[in-house]
Image (spheres, rainbow, N blue to C red):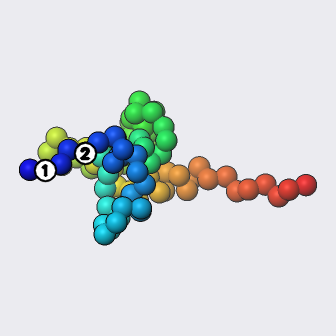
């Protein structure tokens, strides 16, 4: 019997999970936890095309690479201390 995924599993950073490789896609709840934003805000970015999705059947998957590009595009360089 397959163990049901809990909210703690989703919130736990993916790179800290033992014996697993980084997934190439994540589902909406995982993306929300990874980005630290609301579900509705994530859907706004998907609707605007800033975050891409992949539909497989009824599943909505988000490529991790898309999330990485999304964050990189908004990364502001640190200001030098005065």
Disc 2 target residue: 5
Identify the mark at residue 51; answer none if there is no mark: none
The one nearer the camera, 7 or 46, is 7
Residue 5, image x, y percentages: 25, 45
Disc 1 target residue: 2
User: Is there a contact, CB below 8 Å, between mark 2 and mark 1?
Assistant: no
Q: Give me the residue at 67% from left, 52% from top.
A: 76
Residue 53 visible? The answer is no
On-image quarter of the C terminus = bottom right
At mark 1, the secondary structure is: loop
**Residue lying at the far right of the rendered structure:** 82
Q: Quadrant of residue 44?
A: top left
Residue 22, above or below 33: below
Residue 59, image x, y percentages: 20, 44
Residue 67 visible? The answer is yes
At mark 2, the secondary structure is: loop
Q: Residues within 10 Å of mark 2 (few under 14, many from 20)?
A: few
Q: Would residue 1 be found to the left or right of residue 73 on screen?
A: left
Structural distance between the alpha carbons of marks 2 and 1: 9 Å
**Residue lying at the far left of the rendered structure:** 1
């Amino acid at each position: 019997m397959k163990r049901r995924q809990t909210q703690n599993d989703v919130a736990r950073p993916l790179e800290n999970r033992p014996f697993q490789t980084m997934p190439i896609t994540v589902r909406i709840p995982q993306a929300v936890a990874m980005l630290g934003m609301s579900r509705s805000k994530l859907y706004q970015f998907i609707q605007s095309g800033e975050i891409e999705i992949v539909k497989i059947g009824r599943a909505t998957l988000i490529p991790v690479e898309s999330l990485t590009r999304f964050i990189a595009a908004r990364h502001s360089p640190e200001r030098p201390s005065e």
